Image (cartoon, grey):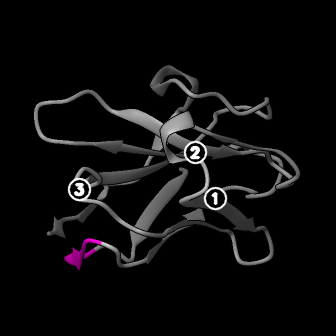
Amino acid sequence: QVQLVESGGGLVQAGDSLRLSCAASGRTFSGYAMGWFRQAPGKERKCVAAISGNGGSTYYTDSLKGRFTISRDNAKNTSYLQMNSLKPGDPATYYCATRGAKRIYGSLTDDYAYWGQGTQVPVSS
């Protein structure tokens, strides 16, 4: 059973940086694309970034390019989301996800089979 556990969330101030981690277990980590999504209250869950199974290719939603960076350490079975210059519009619950098969990453929730429980990132102004 694939399990994903996010960590690193917490209250921050606008302008701060924060790094989220996603630890995976239950199967080989490398080779499976990872995605990070966020969901604000009352809004749909949207992809903020994704990374290929070997880490060589990444995707970012246009509005976050330059502020957020996705990475992965296959030796540690962990994916990271570095978030810089956080804004009042960024607060949400952040989720990591992984694909069910070794395919290119996607940006839709339906592209991912396994999800973490989410970690909250409130941003105070």
- Callouts 3 and 2 close, C-beta under 8 Å: no
Above or below — where is 83 with respect to 62? below
Amino acid type of disc 3? Pro
Residue 49's disc is 2
Secondary structure state at the residue bearing disc 2: strand
Residue toward you, 37 or 117 = 37
Where residue 8 appears, as percent x and y from the top left, is 38, 77
Mark 1, residue position: 70
CA–CA distance in space, label 1 to label 3: 18 Å
At x 35%, y 65%, the residue is 86
Compared across the picture, whether 44 is left or right of 47 comes to left
- Callouts 1 and 3 close, C-beta under 8 Å: no
Disc with the residue nearer the chain's start (1 vs 3): 1
Residue 15's disc is none
At x 35%, y 54%, the residue is 94
Amino acid type of disc 1? Ile
Splitting the image into 4 quarters, where does residue 43 fall?
Answer: top left
Q: Few, some or many C-alpha atoms within 10 Å of disc 1 (few <14, some 14-19, many ≥20)? A: many
- Callouts 1 and 2 close, C-beta under 8 Å: yes
On whether residue 13 falls in the magenta region, the answer is yes
Residue 91's disc is 3
On whether residue 69 falls in the magenta region, the answer is no
Above or below — where is 9 with respect to 88? below
Above or below — where is 60 with respect to 73? above
Q: Few, some or many C-alpha atoms within 10 Å of disc 3 (few <14, some 14-19, many ≥20)? A: many
Compared across the picture, whether 25 is left or right of 58 comes to left
